[in-house]
Image (cartoon, rainbow, N blue to C red):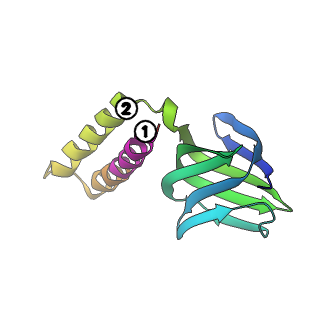
Amino acid sequence: MTSFSLKIVTPDGLVYDGQAEELIVRSISGDIGVLAGHINCVAPLGMGRATVVTDGKKRYAACIGGMLSVVNGAVTLVPTTFEWADQIDTRRVDASYEKAQQVLNDKTSSDTDLRLAEARLHRALVRRNVASNK
């Protein structure tokens, strides 16, 4: 399969810089698959599993927020957070999930606290799902 240049850069630094055969990420309106020769585009990212195929092997990651850019065959992924499945700390995920549940179950939580807890819960579920694909 033909490959393309892929860069994954987070606010913490460069995560990946190399060739890929396929990239699948969650945008705010659904999954986007990128192969070599993809048209130029820019898309905002949602929360979901990213799949990167290199040398015929799939590697999964939790990819949350940011942007995807395809320009003249070069693909740049700039997520807010990006964690490879084998690097996700499941204890931290479970603690975040429990904390979100506590806020959601607390009748005195403000609307802001509830929205933040819902986002935390969603991130924890994405990370938990991706971690199960190690």
**Region rendered in magenta:** 120-133
Distance of label 1 from label 2 (alpha carbons) = 7 Å
Of the pair 105 and 53, the residue shown nearer to us: 53
Q: Outermost residue, left direction?
A: 107
Q: Nearer the viewer, mark 1 or mark 2?
A: 1
Of the pair 103 and 46, the residue shown nearer to us: 46
Residue 7 position in % (x across, y down): 74, 45
Which numbered marker is on residue 9? none
Which numbered marker is on residue 131? 1
- Sequence-wise, the earlier of marks 1 and 2 is 2
Q: Amino acid at mark 2?
A: Thr
Q: Residue at x 58, y 50 (%)?
A: 51
Residue 89 position in % (x across, y down): 42, 29
Neighbours of disc 2 within 10 Å: few (<14), some (14-19), many (20+): some
In the picture, the quarter occupied by the N terminus is bottom right
Of the pair 17 and 44, the residue shown nearer to us: 17
Secondary structure beneath dot 2 equals helix
Residue 110 position in % (x across, y down): 24, 54
Q: Which residue is mark 2?
A: 90
Contact? badges 1 and 2 (CB < 8 Å): yes
Is-magenta flag for residue 127?
yes
Q: Residue at x 79, y 52 (%)?
A: 3
Q: Amino acid at mark 1?
A: Ala
Tell me where residue 58 sits by quadrant.
top right
Is-magenta flag for residue 90?
no
Residue 97 position in % (x across, y down): 29, 41
| As drawn, 48 above or below 102 | below
